[in-house]
Amino acid sequence: MKQLSCLSSAQLSNWLMEASQEAKKGKLADYIPLLQRTDSSLLFICVVTKNNIFLTQGDSKITFSLMSIIKPFLLLYLLSELGDNFIFTKVGSEHSNYPFNSLDQLQLDQGFPRNPMINSGALTLASLLPGKDSHTRLNNLQEWLNKQSNANLFLDKLMLKSVESLPNLRNQSIIDNLTQRKHLKEPEITLDTYNKICCLSATIIDLAKLGLLLVNSPNISSKNVSIVTEIMTTCGLYEASENFAKKIGFPSKSGVSGAILSIVPKEGAIACYSPPLDEQGNSLGGLYMLQKIANYLN
């Protein structure tokens, strides 16, 4: 098997040209106004090795919201703060065949969130962040991630305003169900916190740096890394997770902004950004790039 460090700029450039054609088959997220106005032709990638060697193609200065990519790092932070025994009394770790924002899955599971990568699980975890209000909870997570990764995550206030302009009725229904079943308290603060952390934004290089936390970070417990990457493998791409795991095998997490992050265990991380999405809400251009890289490495 080839190493991630063997990749060249020329290879990435050629694959990006092909990926741009694949991306044309997708659609922009339509339930957040600002995402609807994103330039659908944007496409860039950053590959970083465990030795902190970065290989970037595309505009490395453009920023984008992490959206659901924050979920594995929310889990990582809370594992470090509260421990896995406690966390998994609040949320499960099983795959779901339902969409990421499904209320049906939560009802079938009698109000117990199936895993941390779908909205019910992430909302539950957001309720566990330390702090008396959503601003403090956001800051605690943001500062920890920036310190551990040397990234520069920031709250995109325009994106947050756009998210809040069209209240997410599915998330509200999930919050109501979790509250009724006493799985969380302070529903308003929890939803506000969740919206804020999903609007944490980064460059493609910052996202790759976050990925290294799950590869080569002396301050992160290997046990916690294993927990997070295993859940990313089985749950990170929602209904597409099982098929992706068989075809490509990298622990991955996507976001409806068009970002996607993959971990190459013991090797490094791959961060992609291409806004057009498939039916499951995953970046078509990003998935194409990951497939090409996986084929090359194998």
Image (cartoon, helix red, strand yellow):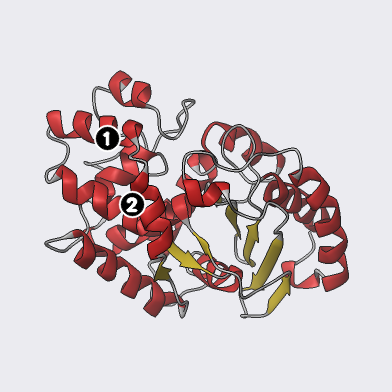
Which quarter of the picture shows residue 233?
A: top right
Q: Which residue is mark 2?
A: 195
* Left or right: where 246 falls relative to 148: right
Q: Nearer the viewer, residue 248 or 164?
A: 164
Q: Is residue 181 visible?
A: no
* Left or right: where 249 falls relative to 83: right
Q: Position of residue 127 (x, y in %)?
A: 21, 50
Q: Where 183 sits versus 149, above or below? A: above
* Left or right: where 127 falls relative to 262: left
Instruction: Please give the name of the residue rendered at 61% of the width and 75% of the height, measured from the top-left corner.
Output: 61
Q: Where 51 sits versus 41, above or below? A: below
Mark 2: amino acid: Asn
Instruction: Please give the name of the residue rendered at 60% of the width and 70% of the height, measured from the top-left corner.
Output: 62
Q: Position of residue 269 (x, y in %)?
A: 61, 65
Q: How many marks?
A: 2
Q: Is residue 124 visible?
A: yes
| Mark 2, secondary structure of its residue | helix
**Who comes first in sequence, dot 2 or dot 1?**
1
Q: Where 255 sits versus 134, above or below? A: above
Q: Residues within 10 Å of mark 2 (few under 14, many from 20)?
A: many
Q: Residues within 10 Å of mark 1 (few under 14, many from 20)?
A: some
Q: CA distance from mark 2 to mark 1?
A: 12 Å
Q: Position of residue 261 (x, y in %)?
A: 58, 57
Mark 1: amino acid: Gln
Q: Nearer the viewer, residue 118 or 77?
A: 118
Q: Which residue is mark 1?
A: 172
Q: Position of residue 183 (x, y in %)?
A: 17, 37
Instruction: Please give the name of the residue rendered at 16% of the width and 41% of the height, measured from the top-left corner.
Output: 184
Q: Where 66 sits versus 49, above or below? A: above
